[in-house]
Image (spheres, rainbow, N blue to C red):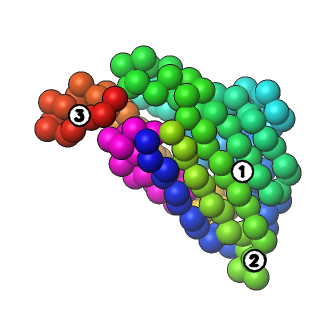
Amino acid sequence: MRLVVKEVTIDAPVTLVYQLLTDPAHLVRWLADEADIEARPGGLVRWRHANGDVCTGQVVEAVPSRRLVFTYGWARPEVQIPPGSTTVEIDLAATPDGTRLRLTHHGLADHMAEIHSGGWAHYLSRLVTATGTGDPGPDPFVDQRVPTPAELRGLGVRCDG
């Protein structure tokens, strides 16, 4: 299992960044076509991309303007990341330039860590844009789905799961 760690500095206050992470009306601006989140321990986390892929989990920890932790997985069983099987931690810190965001995704198999590393980089870039101009535009990942281990093996990728 591997960690995926991504860090970005965002030219916005931590209160705004936290709102973009925890308000469904803001999540649909940068992350997915549909989103639900209850930012409290035990609360639902669910989003659906335009391609139909659904990610789901449960909030583990929510500290306003500081930290959000939730379990994570895909509803499509063939992806082999069941709902709630991995954990995403997002830590926010105020800086002179705005907010430092650190995302750590725990529990991914090596081949899925590579895919999710690129995905998180893409979506954090859209989050940065959403705090600035407010409109990251259409998501170019709209037609892409998370590949299954079987699909990856067909491309010659070694899968450990």
Inspect this view and state whether residue 84 appears: yes
Could you tell me which residue is drawn at 62 percent across and 71 percent down?
9
The mark that comes first in sequence, 1 or 3, is 1
Residue located beneath label 3 in the image? 152
Could you tell me which residue is drawn at 36 percent across and 19 percent down?
78
Depth order, front residue of 137/81 = 81
Could you tell me which residue is drawn at 84 percent across and 35 percent down?
40
State the count of labels: 3
x and y, in percent, of residue 99 in the image? 72, 69
Q: Which residues are magenta?
A: 108-125
The mark that comes first in sequence, 2 or 3, is 2
x and y, in percent, of residue 67 in the image? 77, 52
Residue located beneath label 2 in the image? 95
Depth order, front residue of 13/161 = 161
Cβ atoms under marks 1 and 3 closer than 8 Å: no
Looking at the image, is mark 2 or mark 1 nearer the viewer? 2
Badge 3 density bin: few <14, some 14–19, many ≥20, Cα 10 Å:
some
Badge 2 density bin: few <14, some 14–19, many ≥20, Cα 10 Å:
some
118 horizontally vs 36: left or right: left
Q: Amino acid at mark 2?
A: Thr
x and y, in percent, of residue 20 in the image? 72, 50
Hey, which residue is sitting farthest top in the picture? 77
Q: Amino acid at mark 3?
A: Leu
Q: Magenta region's main secondary structure?
A: helix
The mark that comes first in sequence, 2 or 1, is 1
Q: CA distance from mark 2 to mark 3?
A: 40 Å
Residue 11 vertical position relative to residue 7 in the rendered view, above or below: below
Q: Amino acid at mark 1?
A: Leu
Residue located beneath label 1 in the image? 20
Q: CA distance from mark 2 to mark 1?
A: 18 Å
